[in-house]
Amino acid sequence: QVQLVESGGGLVQAGGSLRLSCAASIRTFTNYYMGWFRQAPGKEREFVAAIRGGGGSTYYADSVKGRFTISRDSAKNTVYLQMNSLKPEDTAVYYCAARLLAASQYDYWGQGTQVTVSS
């Protein structure tokens, strides 16, 4: 059973930074894509960023390119989302997710962590 636990959310002023962490209980971390999604009040959940568990390829939503960086520490089975130059529109609950490399959708989700950016 895969378990994902996010941490690092909080309240920050516009222009500030936060780093989210996702600790994954995954036996073979390199067999998974790890992703970050977010859901703002009244909106659908949207993709933010993803990375192969084994490293290398990264993917970003256009809205966060150049501001957010996804990374992973395979030794710790942990994925990070460094968020810089935060904007009020980045306010959302951020979710960590995992899927096997061959899967078409993310099957495993964390409980979410709130990020609030004040103007």
Image (tube, rainbow, N blue to C red):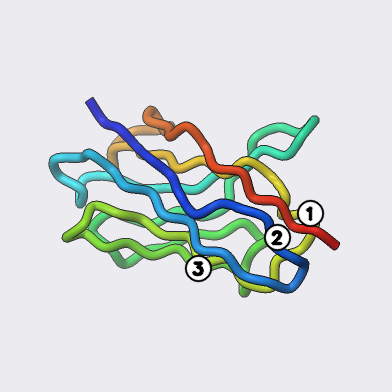
**Disc 1 residue type (three-letter):** Glu
Circle nearer the N terminus (1, 2) = 2
Q: CA distance from mark 3 to mark 2?
A: 12 Å
Secondary structure, mark 1, is helix
**Disc 2 residue type (three-letter):** Ser
Circle nearer the N terminus (3, 2) = 2
Q: How many marks?
A: 3
Q: Are marks 1 and 2 in contact (CB under 8 Å)?
A: yes
Q: CA distance from mark 1 to mark 3?
A: 17 Å
Most extreme residue toward the top is: 1
Q: Residue shown at 26%/63% (left/top)?
A: 73
Q: Position of residue 101 (x, y in %)?
A: 29, 42
Q: Are marks 1 and 3 in contact (CB under 8 Å)?
A: no
Disc number for residue 1: none
Question: The N terminus is located in which quarter?
Answer: top left
Q: Position of residue 75 (x, y in %)?
A: 16, 60
| Residue identified by numbered label 2 | 63
| Residue identified by numbered label 1 | 89
Q: Position of residue 23 (x, y in %)?
A: 32, 47
| Residue identified by numbered label 3 | 69
Q: Nearer the viewer, mark 3 or mark 2?
A: 3
Q: Residue shown at 61%/44% (left/top)?
A: 114
- Whether residue 45 sits left or right of residue 7 in the image: it is right
In which image quadrant can residue 24 be found? Answer: top left
Q: Residue shown at 61%/70% (left/top)?
A: 17
**Disc 3 residue type (three-letter):** Thr
Q: Residue shown at 71%/51% (left/top)?
A: 116
Q: CA distance from mark 1 to mark 2?
A: 10 Å
Most extreme residue toward the right is: 119
Circle nearer the N terminus (1, 3) = 3
Q: Few, some or many C-alpha atoms within 10 Å of disc 1 (few <14, some 14-19, many ≥20)? A: few
* Camera-side residue of 43 and 61: 43
